Amino acid sequence: MINQVYRLVSPRQFEVTYKDRSLKHDEDFVVIRPTHLSICAADQRYYTGTRGVEAMAKKLPMALVHEGIGKVVYDPKGELSSGTQVVMVPNTPTEQDEVIAENYLRSSKFRSSGYDGFMQDYVFLSRDRIVPLPENVNPRVAAFTELITISTHAIARFERKSHSRRSNFGVWGDGNLGFITSLILKKKYPGSKVFVFGKTEYKLDNFTFVDGVYQIDKIPENLLIDHGFECVGGQGSQLAINQIIDHIHPEGAISILGVSEYPVEINTRMVLEKGITVIGSSRSGREDFVQTVELMKQFPDILEYFGILVGQVCEVKTVQDIIQAFEKDLTSSWGKTVMEWHI
């Protein structure tokens, strides 16, 4: 069959390319028709050309988007019926390691980061790269399941590497990732307190489920936390990490989720004095998608909270619609831009 792939060829310019793919003699792959795709900040760095000249030259042309869901079109083994709604896993490992998780293996491929993402008519995925979704899930929320798995993965790593005192948590960051991380922490540790620290009052107003919100320039000196999560990214992560160091109890753990393009300075002296454990987390693997879907089933109301993160919804039928969706996303101050993929 001939598959159309919508690739970014230069900043703000997409072109349609055609790839021939046989449906015969390949039972390991399932054909998925994307239905809802979510735009990520990483996609925007490519779209706007701010990723860097060297990276752009190396990775383009490339289909963007690594957050998305779709419906099964064809399963050669017949294990999944046509129309089954699934979330697509963008990380694609090429080997297994007894110690290193699939998303940290340097050999793994990641869609929309050097390899074609989900902006295609059909996506051919290994059957272990799809996870069926609950029947009642809001597809606009499910579109950014991959982002939710980032928090699921980080919290799982935190649980394995931190001490057991978890009376209260601090989450720095009032954006999408901070919202998701705070909500999952509150669900997994209902007896613990979760405090959120941010810069923007109207964003902090959305955190109705936590035990307290604070402007980062108005944090009480006597407020102490057992563990902290940095969900800021960029140059702002420097201030966030150092504030966590100031307000964390000795031997607490700091989970770093925010991505920064440049090195940041942190107060290593106090990291040493307090015996702080610093845990880095990046991306996620299949198991994190499975656990996230289970979380949706266990706490159905979590989907209603995640619904607050649905910002703009754009119907995409043409390449120009793709451009308009990315442009609208650039002006959005809150939530995720979801493309309803009808192209």
Image (cartoon, rainbow, N blue to C red):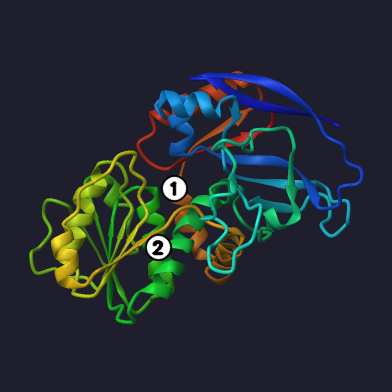
Callout 1: SS: helix
The residue positioned 55% from the left and 52% from the top of the image is 145
The circle drawn on residue 147 is none
* Residue receiving disc 1: 309
- Name of the residue lying farthest toward the right: 24
Residue 135, image x, y percentages: 69, 59
Name the residue tied to disc 2. 183
Q: Name the side, left or right, on which 209 lies relative to 215.
A: right
Q: Quadrant of residue 342?
A: top right
Circle 2 SS class: helix
Residue 199, x across and y down, in percent: 21, 46
Of residues 77 and 59, the one nearer the viewer is 59
Q: Is residue 169 left or right of residue 341?
A: left
Q: Residue furthest bottom?
A: 164
Labels 2 and 1 touching (C-beta < 8 A): no
Badge 1 amino acid: Leu
**Residue flagged by tag 2: what amino acid is it?**
Leu
**Residue 49, can we see it?**
no
